[in-house]
Amino acid sequence: VKLLILGAGAIGGYVGGRLHQGGADVTFLVRPARQQALRDGLVIKSPKGDIIQKVKTVLEGGEGGPYDVVLLTCKAYDLGSAIAAIAPAVGANTTVVPLLNGMRHLDVLDAKFGKDRVAGGLARVGVAMVDGTILHTSPFAAISFGERDGKPPRQALVELDAAVKKSGVDGGLHGNIVQDLWDKWIMLCSLAATNCLMRGSSGDILEADEGRTIVLETVDECHRTAAAAGCDPGEKGLQTIRGFLTVKGSRFTASMLHDLEKGAMVEADQIVGDMIARAKKAGISTPNLRMAYAHLQVYLARRARAG
Amino acid sequence: VKILILGAGAVGGYWGARLHQAGIDVTFLLREKRAETVRRNGLVVKSPKTGDVALPVKVVTKANDGGPYDVIILACKGYDLGSAIAAIAPAVGANTTIVPILNGHMHFATLDGRFGREKVAGGLARIGGMLGPNGEILHSGASGVSFGERDGKPPRAALVELDAACTKAGIVGGLNPDINQDLWDKWIMLGAIASMCGAMRGTVGDIMEADEGGAIMAEILEECRAVAAAEGYPPSDKVVGEIRASLTQKGGKSVASILGDIEKGGAVEARSIVGDMLARARKFGVAAPNLRFAYAHLQTYEARRARGGLK
């Protein structure tokens, strides 16, 4: 399987780097500055082993193709420019596997490339890029992908799964990727909304009188929205999410809070705003998400006026 | 009238400076460090209203120096009330009236318990400003005060004299026959703006940029209004209308000082401004979902500050 990865940032760099290490045919579509930086090799530091390796890079999606799979690992707010960049690489037999947060991007990609070319996918990798080096800090590094209509997977995804199995990245082909997308989104939206609205880690929030209640209500708002979409994660899945968000003393935070505190762009619309929009359509009230989204919009307004 | 002011921050400092300029007998009771700065530089006030001045005001660090005092103006933050009480106690004589200008209502029970209700008047300030990096008072416009008898009786001589002193000093407001209502009117405004600027981390104008920002602001003001009404102090429609207009002004530059405190990692009056409002809402069965979020935000901030986890 011949892979093109858009971006060699934290997620794309880590996943692509591991796939390359496992012997897959990987090319990174990057900007000139990143290509320059990668001339001496892609650097990954990880508890699973540090690597420096030469990788193939291209500046245009039309170079080096055709590709069987295009892995999209941009931030959701960069989707427009990412689509423009990969478009020349998407041929008749190419499958686009987006690893973005939320679900909104799927509609945009379907409209551009046709639903049959767009698989479902997500990443669970705790990773950051610092000075061009990819720092994998958490114990988990998994991706998940599959057919959104639940049909048997196409050849390209079966081959991608085989490449993943050889790479040391966990996960792979998923029989119900749409459910997995919702499961991740419930978790991420609850965590990001509460961490950002309260500006603290889950452990800090639990110190407030109503902190625990507010966190659990927020999970429930997301849960009901998922259930209305036909993707109820079930009691066991919910217990995992609730448990993770209510660990006393936890210093774990959503990366969105770090972005907020350093004045960076945030995926407010895709992670929180779109959840509210879907809830509203289903007649589900989301007072906690409403507050969190207002907080994020205030942040963005203030950032726009550089305050 | 002989006046002692505890604290020379933006509020107490500005008020005292204007009284001093008008020739009133004012003494500041300050902590050692602040006293030293004021003794060395004078009390420096920069104001669009009065220009920039450095005043050689009287300063003491112990309350039994220079007394007895007719009026003690308490201009500390709510979280410093305990140490403020200890500081002024030696200056409180049989004929002393205490005029606290703290935010909220929680301080009254503490002061009444310590000094006796009859010694404690009601009071508040509407003075805009902050302290600059060198301890100078940067005054930013508003300069009103309000004080009076909490039981609504005719005012005692000390308050009448304080009122005359304020008039002479060009401070607007002064003696208010309905100070309890005014305390609530101020608190509902402050409860709403401090909750929102604190929990949303922005100015009124920033909050208005969020789709639901104006609606949430109006709801939280309504929560505060309903608490005041339940307490027996319903603000007039005119007062509520004016507050709502100013707190939902597109592009409004208004911001609660609590946001500045949060952003410099300082202590905040979370409990006296927001927590106590929420507690009263619960007591009366007034729904206060937005105050609940705001108080949780401020408590999260305090928890994170306490563990040294800010930045």
Image (cartoon, helix red, strand yellow):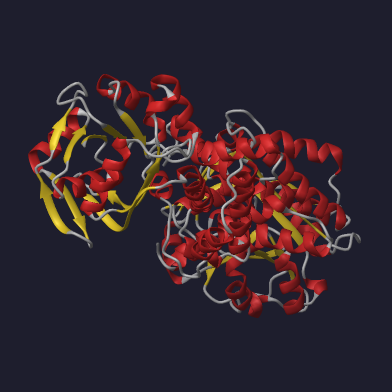
The residue shown at (12%, 36%) is: B58
Query: Is residue B255 toward the left or the right of residue B199 in the image?
Result: left
Indicate the position of residue A151 as horizontal and vertical percent values.
91, 61
Decide if residue B192 is on the left or right side of residue B128: right
**Residue lying at 50% horizontally and 57% vertically, measured from the top left:** A54
- Residue B191 x, y percent position in the rendering: 52, 47
Quarter residue A80 falls in: bottom right
Is A6 drawn above or below residue B194 in the view shown? below
Foreground of the two, A100 or B161: B161
- Nearest the camera: A73 or B215? B215
Q: Quarter of the image containing the C terminus of chain B?
A: top left
Q: In the image, residue B117 lies at what x, y percent?
A: 44, 26
Q: Is residue B50 left or right of residue B86?
A: left
Q: Residue at x 54, y 51 (%)?
A: B192
Q: Residue furthest right?
A: A151
In the current view of this chain or complex, which residue is farthest to the front? B154
In this image, A179 relative to B170: left or right?
A: right
> Does residue A56 show up?
no
* Depth check, front residue: A225 or A33: A225
> Hey, which quadrant is residue B51 in on the image?
bottom left
Q: Residue at x 59, y 61 (%)?
A: B213
The total of numbered circles placed on residues is: 0
Q: Quadrant of the N terminus of chain B?
A: top left
Q: Position of residue A55 (x, y in %)?
A: 53, 60
Question: Observer-nearest residue: A36 or A182?
Answer: A182
- In the image, residue A29 above or below residue B276: below
Is residue B273 visible in the rendered image? The answer is yes
